[in-house]
Amino acid sequence: MVEFSIADRRYTYIHEFNAEAVDVHHILVQTSKARGLFLCLTAFALLVNASCFFLVKDVSISILWSLLFSAIIIKSMFWKPVVKESVIIMPAFGVQLETHYRSGRIVRRFVPIDKILKPLLVECVTSVTCYWSMSFILREEADLMLVFKELRPPVKMLAPIWKALCVASGSEENSGTYSK
């Protein structure tokens, strides 16, 4: 049963709560029809350039450059093959983190609930950009564990997941610095 959802330009957040006390949070990547059309046109241009490359004996440098440019554009269109990332909270057992790829592959990671000390919302600042991410402080681990490895959803989508993780792990919600 879908309880709550938020959508923006790049991502859609869906919260499902089952009667078995399993709390499921999905972050889906928005797909664009214009991107698909652009990808088809670029693939067509790559096919035309490749056929010119093999059919024409006198290969000009412009054909090689357009062939390389088309290949780079197609590769950049498929650079993020992630469809969705999910956080499945089972308060009695732990948290399962899932990453679903466009190819159908699913990567699952399970963290036992007694190993989670505290979920964190962290603001990451680089020289170019600033974004929010979610991490776990784990017992007997020196490093933080990222919850969303591939996607960078906005903080308005991360906040409900963080609150549910705080409740499930037993850590105090008020001790964090996030307030919205």
Image (cartoon, helix red, strand yellow):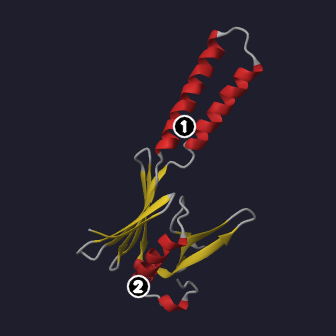
Q: Which residue is mark 2?
A: 167
In front of the other: label 1 or label 2?
1
Q: What kind of element bears circle 1?
A: helix
Identity of the residue drawn at 43% across and 79% down:
165
* The image quarter in which residue 76 lies: top right
Viewer-closest of 94 and 81:
81
Mark 2 Cα within 10 Å, few/some/many (few <14, many 20+)? Answer: few
Viewport quadrant of the N terminus: bottom left
The answer to whether the residue labelled 1 contacts the one labelled 2, judged by CB atoms less than 8 Å apart, is no
Q: Which residue is mark 1?
A: 38
Q: Can you see residue 115?
A: yes
The amino acid marked with disc number 1 is Phe
Q: Is residue 98 visible?
A: no
Which residue: 57% across, 70% down?
Answer: 133
Q: Position of residue 132 (x, y in %)?
A: 59, 71
Cα distance, mark 1 to mark 2?
44 Å
In the picture shown, does residue 177 fall above or below 30? below
Please state the horizontal and vertical placement of residue 155, each as a whole percent of the image: 54, 72
Q: Is residue 84 above or below residue 105?
A: below
Between 131 and 114, the one lying in front of the other is 131
What is the x, y in percent for residue 116?
47, 79
Asked which secondary structure carries label 2, the reply is helix
